[in-house]
């Protein structure tokens, strides 16, 4: 396995936020999963040359279909094994633009036992054409099926919030595919995931709200999920069928199956599934702005194959969900900015009288805290500290302000784990794990500080996230957790992260306060002349 891996790939670097060495990336992250040299045997794979469609490589299981050894197919035009009509459809598909856009194509293969109909799935990659044949399911091409997809999309568009949208997507994918459990999970910034919605058969344990460590889906699996959004493993117990030969005829080297639908799966992933007691899986990526936002993950207690058309329908549902996530996020930001305007107007009004900045701010403090999702606020200047809500003591705030003023950058400082960069803050992490610090100006020593408490909620981990590495029978590589017992861990010293629109709101409050101060200074100046 490792002989193929790329020596230029980075080693697992960095410790995780708790200071433990992140070992769980080493082997698994470098397993060359895009060139497994084999496919899952529920279909057949042919590599054909672009020009004359001669077979350059084929999966060994083709012997079951054509009853001749794979080596005897090499260099034969693939049309030789297709009906005339199918050969014409294939040629036509390859002479258009992107062949992947018209998948699947019906291809009838001429076998010793007569003709058999398949879904032909084509893609070009690395200067070669890859044709995969999968079982064809005629019954699904009905109006009934399209109607059910339309219903799914309409339901999704009515969702008023994210959990509802994700739950609708899960239940519709389950209705269309018949899998026993569908879960939707979302990745955090550190690539750990949380199950945010689920639809399942009542006999299967729930994983709702479970968190999974980032090692569950290693970096290069995520890269593949981002470019090739649908993944299916109809039978966990399959025996991989090797490519004969596993050589790209144009480039040399092993054949890159990144975009293949039959690509064989990493043994680590299969082990993981077996540990979950599942025998079939499908996953559909939720990709926002070219970044993997989350996954719709489907599992079944028994082997289960769903046809290409059904998978396309699921991909469509995932795309509508992605769109809906964007719509809901926009709506939340709009609501936030409407509240923001109202507070700015009140602030202007309150700061308009002569009572000074602190008095004006204190009268609007409740709304300001609510708007910022903060539990405390402090204005820190030469005159001392004015604090509202739950904050550290004035001395602690002064010490914090002094530390902030000695940082290189005088801009905005934000963190969800203050004690990681300012260890003294450990003592008040329960009330101020999150800090958003906004200086009033480049030269100003006045600071606005927003505080957020730690999220001391208990996180339910699927297995112990801190023990993913064991030296197993296959040497040192990720041994997936043997049990999925809920494993609890307190998330200490961290607050909810600051969202970009909240930071913008804090900047707007600063600008308003600066305007008022400058206005006063000018007035003051005019009075004295």
Image (cartoon, grey):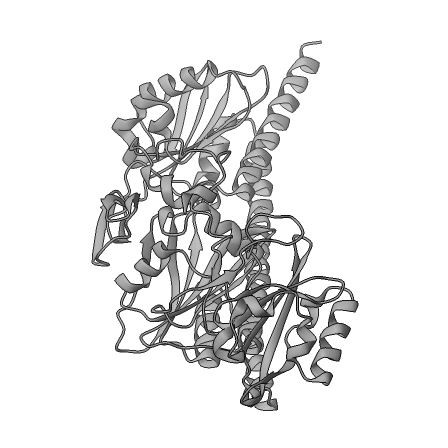
For the point 50% across and 43% down, the residue is 499
Tag count: 0
Q: Quadrant of residue 305?
A: bottom left
Q: Quadrant of the C terminus?
A: top right
Residue at 33% across / 52% down in the picture?
212
Q: Quadrant of residue 513?
A: top right
Q: Is residue 383 above or below residue 93?
A: above
Q: Is residue 328 left or right of residue 522?
A: left
Is residue 484 depicted above or below 400 in this figure?
below
Residue 7 on image: x %, y %: 48, 35
Residue 77 image offset from top left, x and y in percent: 69, 71
Residue 89 against residue 528 in the figure, above or below: below
Q: Position of residue 498 (x, y in %)?
A: 47, 40
> What residue is rendered at 37% in x and 39% in y?
26
Relative to 291, 55 lies left or right? right
Residue 157 can be seen, yes or no: no
Q: Nearer the viewer, residue 202 or 307?
A: 307
- Tell me if residue 345 comes above or below residue 354 in the rendering: below
User: Which residue is nearer to you in this view: 114 or 422?
Assistant: 114
Question: Which one is nearer the viewer's eye here, 237 or 523?
Answer: 237
Q: Is residue 464 left or right of residue 324?
A: left
> Measured from the top left, where is residue 24 in percent x and y?
33, 41
Residue sitting at x 28%, y 43%: 491
Whether residue 373 appears in this view of the structure is: yes
């Amino acid at each position: 396995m490792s002989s193929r891996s790329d020596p230029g790939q980075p080693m697992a670097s960095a410790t995780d936020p708790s200071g433990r060495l992140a070992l769980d990336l080493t082997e698994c992250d470098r397993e060359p999963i895009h060139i497994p040299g084999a496919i899952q045997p529920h279909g057949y794979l042919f590599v054909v040359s672009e020009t004359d469609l001669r077979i350059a490589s084929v999966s060994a299981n083709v012997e079951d279909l054509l009853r001749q050894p794979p080596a005897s197919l090499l260099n034969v035009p693939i049309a030789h094994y297709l009906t005339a009509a199918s050969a014409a459809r294939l040629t036509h598909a390859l002479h258009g633009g992107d062949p992947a856009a018209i998948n699947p194509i019906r291809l009838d293969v001429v076998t010793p036992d007569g003709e058999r109909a398949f879904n032909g799935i084509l893609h070009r990659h690395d200067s070669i054409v890859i044709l995969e044949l999968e079982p064809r399911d005629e019954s699904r091409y009905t109006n009934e099926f399209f109607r059910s997809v339309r219903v799914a999309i309409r339901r999704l568009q009515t969702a008023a919030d994210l959990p509802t949208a994700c739950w609708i997507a899960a239940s519709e994918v389950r209705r269309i595919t018949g899998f026993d459990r569908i879960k939707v999970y979302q990745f955090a910034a550190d690539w750990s995931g949380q199950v945010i919605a689920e639809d399942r058969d009542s006999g299967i344990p729930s994983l709702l709200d479970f968190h999974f460590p980032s090692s569950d889906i290693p970096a290069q699996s995520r890269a593949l999920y981002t470019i090739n959004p649908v993944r299916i493993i109809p039978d966990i117990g399959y025996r991989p069928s090797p490519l004969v030969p596993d050589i790209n005829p144009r480039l040399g080297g092993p054949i890159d199956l990144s975009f293949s639908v039959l690509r064989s799966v990493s043994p680590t992933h299969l082990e993981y599934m077996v540990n979950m007691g599942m025998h079939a899986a499908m996953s559909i990526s939720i990709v926002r702005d070219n970044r993997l936002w989350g996954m719709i993950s489907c599992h079944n207690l028994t082997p289960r194959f769903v046809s290409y058309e059904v998978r396309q329908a699921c991909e469509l549902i995932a795309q509508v969900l992605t769109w809906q996530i964007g719509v809901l996020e926009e709506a939340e930001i709009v609501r936030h900015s409407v509240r923001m305007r109202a507070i700015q107007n009140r602030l202007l009004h309150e700061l308009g009288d002569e009572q000074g900045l602190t008095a004006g701010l204190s009268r609007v403090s409740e709304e300001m805290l609510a708007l910022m999702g903060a539990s405390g606020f402090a204005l820190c200047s030469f005159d001392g500290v004015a604090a509202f809500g739950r904050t550290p003591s004035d001395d602690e705030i002064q010490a914090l302000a002094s530390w902030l003023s000695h940082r290189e950058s005088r801009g905005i400082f934000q963190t969800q784990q203050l004690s990681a960069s300012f260890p003294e803050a450990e003592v008040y992490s329960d009330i101020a794990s999150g800090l958003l610090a906004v200086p009033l100006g480049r030269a100003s020593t006045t600071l606005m500080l927003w505080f957020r408490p730690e999220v001391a909620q208990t996180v339910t981990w699927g297995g112990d996230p801190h023990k993913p590495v064991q030296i197993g029978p296959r040497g040192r590589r990720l041994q997936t957790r043997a049990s999925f017992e809920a494993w609890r861990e307190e998330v200490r010293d961290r607050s909810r992260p600051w969202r970009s629109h909240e930071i913008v709101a804090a900047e707007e409050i600063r600008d308003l306060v600066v305007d008022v101060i400058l206005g006063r200074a000018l007035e003051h100046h005019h009075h004295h002349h």
